[in-house]
Image (spheres, coloured by chain):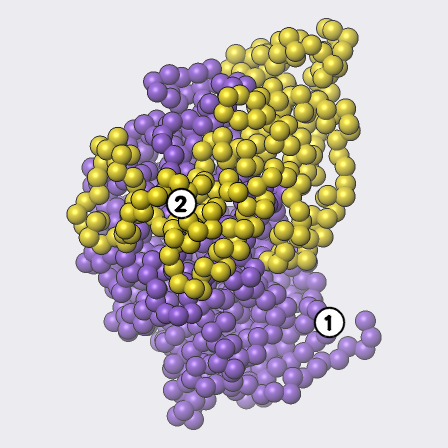
Amino acid sequence: MDRRSSLRWMGWGTISAGVLLNACKNADKNVVDNAKADPDAFTPGRMEEEELHDKKLMSEQFFTQHELATIAVLSDIIIPKDDVSGSATDAKVPDFIEFMVKEKPEFQVPLRGGLRWMDLYMMKRYEKSFKDASKEQQIELVDQIAYPDKATDAMKAGVSFFSLMRNLTASGFYTTAIGFKDVGYIGNAPNNWNGVPDDVLKQYGLSYSEKELRECVSFEVIKDQATLQPAGQGI
Amino acid sequence: MGDLQIKKQPKHYDAVIVGSGAGGGMAAYTLANAGLNVAVIEAGPMYDPRTDSLQLKNAWDSPRRGASTKFRPFGDFDACYWGWEIDGEPYTQSGKMKWDWWRARMMGGRTNHWGRISLRFGPQDFKRKSIDGLGENWPISYEDIKPYYDRIDKMLGVFGSNEGLPNDPDGFFLPPPKPRLHEMFIKRAATNIGIPVIPSRLSILTKKINDDRGVCFYCKQCYRSCKVYADFSSSSALIIPAIKTGNVDLLTNCMAREVLTDKNGMATGISYINKEDGLEYQVTGRTVVLAASACESSRLMLNSKSLTHPNGVANSSNVVGKYLHDSTGADMGGIIPALTDRKRYNEDGVGGMHVYTPWWLDNKKLDFPRGYHIEYGGGFGMPLYGFSWGIEKLNGTIPVNGKTKEAGGYGASLKQDYRNYFGAHVGMAGRGETVAREDNYCEIDPTVVDKYGIPVLRFHTNYSDYEIKQAKHMKETFAEILHSMGAVVTWGGDDGPANNYGLHNPGKIIHEAGTARMGNDPRSSALNKYNQAHDCKNLFVMDGAAFVSQADKNITWTILALALRSSEYLVDQMKKKNL
């Protein structure tokens, strides 16, 4: 967030301004898509037990290089680069999934087993692992496990695995600055809530009642609102 | 460990308070400002939202992107240390329905992350037995507590609107924020079928109330606690100001073990273990105030046995631990197809709903005795761990711009689905009143101790048909509202008799109360109407334990009002040399 516009935007007393400017600065610093967040970024406000837990997880490695490379290929099939935003690997989704299987060990067997299930499927047909198969061969398998309602019984194990991968990939992707921008999340920034914008009210045939307009907190409309940057896109 | 010694703190206090949440915070603030010397014992570490809040952090600042851990069951950015489990501090069960027990271990306790829903109990809520013959009446009426509600509204700040409702009293409200888009959909739909929707009542400062606290800047993150103190937490709004008087010693990381008593049965102080050095201490005081949370305060009382208090301190009535009850809870949610693929803008707003539904029906015409209120959620939230989890269950059934796709999928088409459903979700949660019963209780488990050697609680809880029928009614209401707004139910719609209509386990709503209830008769209550123990007049209990019943309202505002009233009574009794 631009500092001057944020100050103008906020317009509160001195107590809050300093704290918030620092908070904004920190948010800007973290704009890079760092999948492995700096654990120090969290202190203070973290319990010692949590710090130790995080350090332990970060010192461990669960997936093999082969598995991680397979996750990379698969996550980019699920969330590829398009004309709006980058791909899952651009947002370092494989690193996130590596962390999450240590955080939630219940994912370890389904993911490891599912990756092996895919490799075996490909080996039988094409004598190649999933990641080394051609794009067409990969998609041929993915098409059979990506649509739960259409999948044959023989492919149901793959469907469960793929659904979990889809969900984890989305969690890893949309929780980065790339993902925020893609989905259009504009928040996590000091502002004055002045109600639903007029054009949106109009679109849905809604309006605030006289009672609401009378009793609710309201702010002067700030003309340069459009120049404000969404969260995570500052300079 | 070497020879076990008990170290006695040399300073003798006017009051030793156990716990720093809503009750303990209000006691510390009131007593310290009256000039008393106060010790506050807190089982967890120091916590100041100004420095320790994770407010305005982005999702990627957490390696788990805000997912929950046992340290933070409500997610990695949530302000509360610990929750359903604490390492080395077990609790056990003997009832039909498991009791879920949330325990905070930090200065300010659960008030650092709570929903800030600040509802006064109404006149009927203090006299339910007179209305439906169930449970017990309070020894006080709304008129007794109204002046204290009025004062905390002004002292701590709460927004809302005066509606003139008979059992949801008006107050001194700051202006509420305007409803968000999905809340306007809810309001229109619910109003059309006769269900009222009014501005919510949250202790969040939409206007400046004093120089020590800032004003809300609408980040929706009250659950992370507020760096500018713009919402009510006991840490920021009570304990820290109390410390500034110079009259408060805050003992953090100290776990209370017992209430100490003398041969006459009077309280003399608290024994505790300091978690940092592992040593045993005693701190003495002219009065003792328990505010460790309803169940922890009762545990302390039950563990404080002596010749004069063989059944636990102040428990000649044998009611301590009994009448344990939580709010009921059941939920449902869906997607509003009309809100798919909608325009983006910052609609964070305050940390919580901008509108809610107070109880609106007459129980005489229903098959269950007590009411519930409805809380609403939805809108564009910060994408965190679990974002659009299970989209394969949405994109095959919910049309976007009139078209429905094959469920599941991948690639550019899937990316468009995530965009389309973002901000189209709406959820609702019923929070209702349970009838407090003697046979729902916690007691000391004679066979289990925690890692400090303190005997732990064993819970014995069950629901009756009253609560189950209420949950059924909630679900029917939610389905009606969702239907009326054209939403497609996506979760919570499959519950039925087999799972008590999705009624949450008792304890799950984290409004536990009733375990050392007040009353005029010392044979059936532990405390008098001033939160003072019948059997031990210099012992006070100022948390939810004192409640006779808990209404269909969140209990914090009433804990605060009662603690203010009780603390001023304590000061007055000291002045009169009665304590």
Q: Chain of mark 2?
A: B
Q: Chain of mark 1?
A: B
Q: Are marks 2 and 1 in contact (CB under 8 Å)?
A: no
Q: Indicate left or right for B354 with B240 as reference.
A: left
The residue depicted at 73 percent of the width and 43 percent of the height is A58
Label number found at residue B277: 1
Chain A shade in the render: yellow
Q: Nearer the viewer, residue A27 or B3?
A: A27
Describe the element under mark 1 as helix, strand or loop: loop
Q: Nearer the viewer, residue B129 or A26?
A: A26
Q: Position of residue A137 (x, y in %)?
A: 66, 8
Identified by mark 2, the residue type is Asp
Hey, which quadrant is residue B249 in on the image? Answer: bottom right
Compared to residue A215, the image places residue B241 above or below, namely below
Hey, which quadrant is residue B366 in on the image? Answer: top left
Chain B shade in the render: purple
Identified by mark 1, the residue type is Asp
Crowdedness near tag 1: few (<14), some (14–19) or many (≥20) residues, C-alpha within 10 Å: few
Describe the element under mark 2 as helix, strand or loop: loop
- Label 2 and label 1: CA atoms lie apart by 44 Å
Hey, which quadrant is residue A115 in on the image? Answer: top right
Compared to residue B62, the image places residue B413 above or below, namely above
Which numbered disc, 2 or 1, marks the residue closer to the eye? 2
Q: Indicate left or right for A203 with B273 as reference.
A: left
| Residue occupied by mark 2 | B348
The residue depicted at 62 percent of the width and 62 percent of the height is B456
The residue depicted at 59 percent of the width and 44 percent of the height is A30
